[in-house]
Amino acid sequence: MPRLIVYSVMVLLMLALIPPVVAARVRATPSEGRPIHIIQDMDIQAKFKAQSENPEYADQRAMRPEVVGAVARGETYLNPHLQNGVVDGGWATSLPEAIKLELKTVERGQQRYNIYCAPCHGWNGSGQGPVNQRALSLMNNADGPPDGTSWTQARNLHDPGWSEQPIGQIFNTVTNGKNSMAGYESQITVEDRWAISIYVKALQRSQNAVMQDVPTSVREEWNR
């Protein structure tokens, strides 16, 4: 094969390598310049930046205040039963229509309770959770309240006056907190707060259950 052809092929191959090498170099090197967009996507669009001026409005501000009376989707809070645990001005004794009383709801409530509630209230609701026990131990062994710090004993959910609370009141406490207990509205969804409330009622019932509470079919199965 003539050398001219060989050299020509070699030159063409080296030239063909230049674009990918340059592209790789550009991608690996930070640059303060604006990126090149072959397709003009949303990175390049007409817009007003925060705190900038907009002559279209009388106050010349690009950032607009919220529209009076506007409510975000899902935040209407027009269902006091679901959102507050209240029915006709009193604590609800039943579940909202959106919450189904079934095994998976109870199991979900147990899971969420063990995460958020058990550290203080204990896994059985007696108020002897690990955080509570640790705090009491530190306070009892200290010479005095350090820097005025104090600890309030976690509530035993089976105490009289608490075990009889309607489920709506329990839900409201989980949502908004009570006394030294903070609310969990921002951390737990409304469905999970109802699931926790259902599980708390199950825990309370478990401490005062009688044989008649067990379905007849289950009792017959035990007696076989």
Image (cartoon, grey):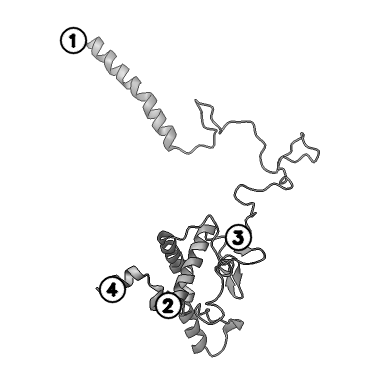
**Depth check: 107 or 152 in front?**
107
Q: Amino acid at mark 1?
A: Met
- Give the Cα separation between the discs numbered 4 and 2: 17 Å
Q: Is residue 103 above or below residue 2?
A: below
User: Circle 2: is it few (<14), some (14-19), or many (20+) Cα within 10 Å?
Assistant: few
- Give the Cα separation between the discs numbered 1 and 4: 95 Å
Looking at the image, which residue sits at the far bottom?
A: 143
Determine which residue is flagged by label 4: 222
The kind of secondary structure element at disc 1 is loop
Q: Is residue 220 left or right of residue 197?
A: left
Residue 81 is marked as 3
* First of labels 2, 3 by sequence position: 3
The kind of secondary structure element at disc 2 is loop
Tell me the mark number nearer the camera, choosing from 3 and 1. Answer: 3
Q: Is residue 146 above or below residue 175?
A: below
Quarter where residue 51 is shown: top right
Residue 209 is marked as 2
* First of labels 3, 1 by sequence position: 1
Taking the spot 52% from the left edge, 85% from the top edge, the residue there is 139
**Depth check: 212 or 196 in front?**
212
User: Circle 1: is it few (<14), some (14-19), or many (20+) Cα within 10 Å?
Assistant: few
- Give the Cα separation between the discs numbered 2 and 1: 99 Å
- Give the Cα separation between the discs numbered 2 and 3: 28 Å
Image coordinates of residue 192 in percent, x first then y, are 49, 60
Quarter where residue 129 is shown: bottom left
Q: Amino acid at mark 4?
A: Trp
Q: Quadrant of the C terminus?
A: bottom left
Is mark 1 in CB contact (under 8 Å) with mark 4? no
Image coordinates of residue 17 in percent, x first then y, are 34, 24
- Give the Cα separation between the discs numbered 3 and 1: 90 Å
User: Circle 3: is it few (<14), some (14-19), or many (20+) Cα within 10 Å?
Assistant: many
Residue 1 is marked as 1
